[in-house]
Image (tube, helix red, strand yellow):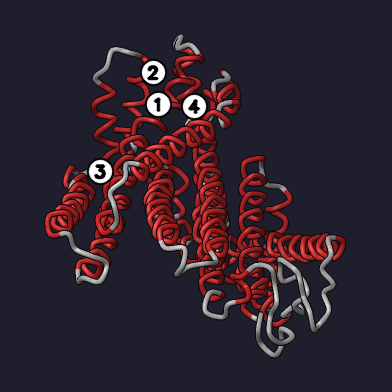
Amino acid sequence: MSALRSDALLAWAMLRGSPRSERWRLALTGLGAALGTGFALAAAVVAVIGTRYGGGPPSYTNGLLNEGGLRPGVITALLLLIVPVLAFVGQCTRIGALQRERRFAALRLAGATPRQVRRIGALETAAACGVGSLAGLTGFLALRLVLHAGQQAGGGDGGPQQRALTWPTDVPVPWAAFLAVVLGLPLLATLEAWFTLRRAATDPLGAAVRRRRPRRFRRVRLLPGPLALLAATGLLLMAMSRKLGPDTPFFAATGLVLPLYLFGLLTSSAGMAAAMGRLASRSGRPALMIAGKRLRADPWAASRAHTAVMLAALIGVGYLTVRRVALDALRAEPEHHPDLAFYVGGYNLAGLALLIGVAVTISGLAVSVAESLTARRRTLAALAAAGTPRKVLRRAVLLETALPLAPAIVLSAACGLAVTGPFLVARAWSARPLLEAALLAGGLLAASLLATAASLPLLRYSVHPAQLRYE
């Protein structure tokens, strides 16, 4: 117990004296923990609706909360929103990674054991996530009170017999679930930090003196993405030639192809970054050459930030296609589906959840670009000192995002269309889903470039001549 107390005091002292990059890392990690806590708490509230603890049968204006068979889908959607939050937190933990490893190496050289170093690092992460979880709990309860007051003022009586509320603000707070969420998220973050610090804790001299060298890239990593696309395209052509309907075994085969898509996209993102870097480095334009050299030197850095955007494109295109086909089918047979507004509202809420996930993903991309500018400030300062104009460096940073991400988004959108293609084949073919997929891909690329542009003010700090002394 005394050892744990001393390590906690040392972790607190290091937190108080942490540099600016560390403070940003801790603040953004806490923000991610607060968002994840909010989504998990919302799922816990929906889970108790209709139970004895929740006050009996529900009666809301939102049909998704009234139907017992649909509430598990709402809970699943809320829990899936934690996935982009975890990706965001993962990007935030990379801020100042090299400086943090060197600080841990200094502790090892001062006599700390590997177990102590890992415990101190885990306690730092636990403190940030714990504060974020408490902030998420406070914000969720405050938002619940505001929504309930607004619904009461709008005419909902909130009584036990007749409830005309839109949101379940009258459900008793499940404190047991809330406590599990608030304590569980920091615990998971602590275990993750304990696992990821194993190398920094056991290799003090290497962490203290080495420079990061990217892993060697192999061209074979370019293959999974195109192979996945060709496989699903073949299934789509088979469906179009045989006019298969929704009750055929083709949909089982499509379910098997979707994991192949995910594997192909995740494993080929670095390959696309390296390929685009090779092409750009042969150009005669300075901005393209700088961006190409950077992508060739470390394609993994680009792939880490772009993977979440690729998944957002895949899921987004699939959602838009299924929504269009399903609503068109419902409108074609109004006598069998009189409550069209209910289905429209359900798809709109799913779209809102997807939009929130995309916003968190784009925020993670902005954090990744900011971290890259901070980590490369010595190189950028050397380029500026050698006479490279700042506008060329700004274009190079934008191109580092645009070059690998544009083909990646197009490939992901094509995969999404191929997965949902049988729905289009089963119904009357329309070019509107193709237009919506193109607009979604263009919107994701534009949002990614805007997120990159939002990080460009850090470039002025990174190219200062004083950064030439940075190691």
Q: What secondary structure is marked by label 4?
A: helix
Q: How crowded is mark 1: few (under 14 residues within 10 Å), some or many (20 or more)?
A: many
Q: Is residue 107 above or below residue 50?
A: above
The reply to whether discs 4 and 3 touch (Cβ–Cβ < 8 Å) is no
Q: Residues within 10 Å of mark 4 (few under 14, many from 20)?
A: many
Q: Which residue is drawn at 50% across and 14% down?
A: 391
N-term mark: 1 or 2: 2
Q: What secondary structure is marked by label 3?
A: loop
**Disc ID at residue 287:** 2
What amino acid is found at the position of numbered circle 4 in the picture? Arg
The residue mark sitting in front, 4 or 3, is: 3
N-term mark: 4 or 3: 3
Q: Choose top left, top right, bottom left or bottom right for residue 82.
A: bottom right
Q: Which residue carries the number 1 mark? A: 399
Q: Is residue 212 visible in this depiction of the protein? A: no
N-term mark: 1 or 4: 4
What amino acid is found at the position of numbered circle 1 in the picture? Leu
Left or right: 252 in relation to 204: left
**Disc ID at residue 378:** 4
State how far apart marks 1 and 2 are (Cα): 8 Å
The reply to whether discs 1 and 2 touch (Cβ–Cβ < 8 Å) is yes
State how far apart marks 1 and 4 are (Cα): 20 Å
